Image (cartoon, grey):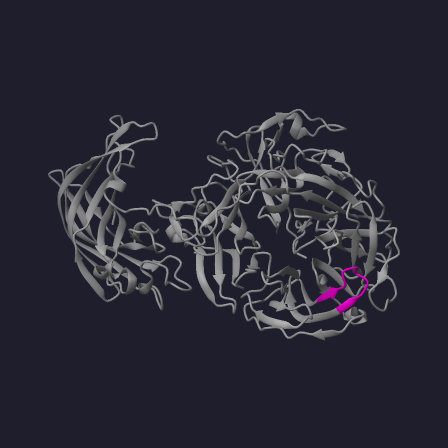
Amino acid sequence: MRRTPLLLTLAAACLLPLPLVHADFVPEGQRSEKAIGGGKLSFWPARADQAEVVTASLLGGKGTEWLVGGDFLADKTLVLAGNVAGGTFDLGVKPTVLGADGAAPGEVQRPKNKKGEPQPYTWGQSGVTGFVVRMSPDYKKVVSVARLPWDSAAITSIVADKDGIYIAGKATDKIKSLAGPARELPVSPDAERKTGLIDFTFVARLSSDASKIHWVRTARGLSDAPRLSFRKDGKLIFAAQDVKTLDSSGEVVSAAVIPGGVRETSSVNPVDGTIVKGGEHHWGTGREPWRCPILNVHEPDGRLRYQLYDWGGPYVGLDNCRQVSDSAVRLVQHDNEGNVSFFAWSDGGNSVMTSMPQDVRMGVGLRGTGLNAAGANVSSFGYIVKLEPKDYRPIGYTFWCARYNGKPNGITVTNMGKTDDGSLAFSGGSAWGLIQSPNFIGKSEPAGNYVAVLSPDMSGVRFCSAIPAVGTGVAGNDDSDVVGIGSGTVDGKPLVVFTAGVQEKGDTYGHIAPPPTVNAAQEKFGGGNSDGWFLVLDLSKGSTPKAAPADTPKPAPKRLTVEAFASRVDPKKPPVTPKDGAVFNFSPTYPKYVTVDAEFRDTKGQMWPSFAYGKPVSGNVTIKNGKPEGSFVVACEKWCQPKGSQARRVMGQYVEGGEQKLTLTVKSLGDSQTQTFTTTNDKGQKQDRTATAHTADAVLQIGTYSVNIKPQILLSFNAGARDGATVGLRGTALLTLKGSQLGLKGPLANEDIDMRLTFQGYDKK
């Protein structure tokens, strides 16, 4: 099991004003030093669609048990799955053993880290056995308990439908003792997969009363925690070594490979079978190291379709970009409609996650809950995003953080779950200052493990509460992933269930508190080193803001015109004027980082824009009699997001099959012309903006295609030296051409295409 300590630090940052309510809640016992030092409890305002807490209960006996998931059956009962470590197991109801039982295992030691500190029990340990519990419709009584034969298998996932209960997890050689027709399934080869938590998995269908097994399927090969879900047509998705679709009889309908393996960063669309895979890789900007987020869309057979985010370190390092906060996609899932939700970790607010996944120059345009990290120091923050599956535009989005002493504080998300009404359920860990909903249930400090539910558009927090004492058993792949999430609909009401393992009391920043209980079947800790715990929320109240559907009109196209780059003149800060005789060189060796970039957009916004980057080649500009003169060459050798299909990108034909070099040769700069544009601001006031441009004589070459052009070039100068000398020049070349003039074929040939090419020259060679 992966060992990932939860390191969350304070961040000195400011927030936009938030509709928060502060309260003085003092739980039993001594408040922590964090609270005494200035921390105040903060709560989200009450909402009409606030989730209703139906029950929060322990479920355990004298053994060491924890829960990993749950679902709701047609007869309104709640079915829970969990594991027991060792051979002591008594939940007050005699269990049905689903097969030929062997000798009970001995005591299973709790894992410890290198410092000797206790860690959560894991389903991967020897001597761990899975079980299934059915609760009454009011969740007050255990109806039945079923246990797998001792040490035969551990459970990591559970789902249910009209045909029964499905469980999956880690198998051992004792899996053959399960009572049911069994067969080993072939595994699709994955040359990219090098690691896995286990190498033997299973999936089984149980009867709806969990009294017998209809069939068992096993598979061998490297795998992380197996996961189950349903396709839109009701067929079962078994994600382990590969992604298999099975019918209710256990027959394989299809199989696909996710390159590198099925992980928490990958998910299968239940509607069309496409696969989305997230992650990160290290890609330096040329100035600093940078962690680059990845989100790739694959065909059902595993072939790459689209590359999202993954802009490239050198491009992000550009002076006119600089979205250099380290970022990584850590969790990915699909909802029932095929929308893609994901959690991205970042160490700050200056992240590419604030931009569109296929357009780094356009902001997301959604505020979500209103949280913001402007000015934050390095910490651990989150971006929670929902993309529609057609154009992969955000239809839900929020920044996510805690708050301490009026400033953002660190937080993370460790698991996500879909709900039947489109809300997003998730769990994670927080530094001191978790913002909770008014109906929070954890009577301790606002920190540590928590659970939450966001509205479908992620603009509102329907539930959020710290859960003290949680964290004794692993539900997923990581030691921090200690909460399982399930959902269903009962009597037309969408419900969500959170499951976990708890200890008798937990320490949160020095405050000792038991796990919370509400209308509980079991209020007191049962014994052993861990009990199961579950929370059921009713999401049927109020009118919940829905996420925008996939056919929502696109935002207005962004134009690359002189007017778009015009600016207001501040008389207190006049533009820098270089001295006569100043020379600005275009050199491929200075500076070492990228200083040239290109952008292409169709003016109707029908296609995804294209971006390229590179360095100067040669030439210079000299200031003579106050005017810039000279000739120079700049080039872009790399294109952003060059992998997968390029059919939706403006300049895709120059990238598909191999990136073709773009070169701009400026032969001469004409006289300047200043244009004034009058606009109206949000207050109805008219404002003048100006832009001064030079008409240039130039040649644009892409691959073997070239065209003579006359772009408008805007120049600005940088006086970065202590003596006030001008040390740098930035030029922006703008032009609108027909697609055919750029050598484009097909639908874009007769469309207008905006081009921007920005470059920099310096007083050094």
Q: Say if 118 sits above or below 129 in the image.
A: above
- Residue drawn at (27%, 50%) of the image: 756
Residue 611 position, x and y percent, is 34, 54
Q: Quadrant of the N terminus?
A: bottom right
Please say whether residue 208 is one of the residues in the magenta stretch: yes
Q: Is residue 36 above or below residue 676?
A: above
The residue drawn where x is 47% and y is 40% is 349
Residue 727 seen in render? no
**Image position, residue 719 (x, y; %):** 27, 36
Q: Is residue 512 left or right of residue 676?
A: right
Determine if residue 178 is in view: yes
Residue 398 position, x and y percent, is 51, 42
Residue 653: x and y in percent read: 32, 64
Q: On the picture, is 707 further left or further right than 145?
A: left
Taking the magenta stretch, the answer to whether it contains residue 616 is no
Please name whichever residue, 419 or 184, is drawn nearer the observer in this view of the structure.
419
Q: Which residue is painted at 23% across and 48% down in the image?
A: 734
The image quadrant of residue 744 is bottom left
Magenta residues span 203-214
The residue sitting at the top extreme is 24
Residue 323, above or below 145: above
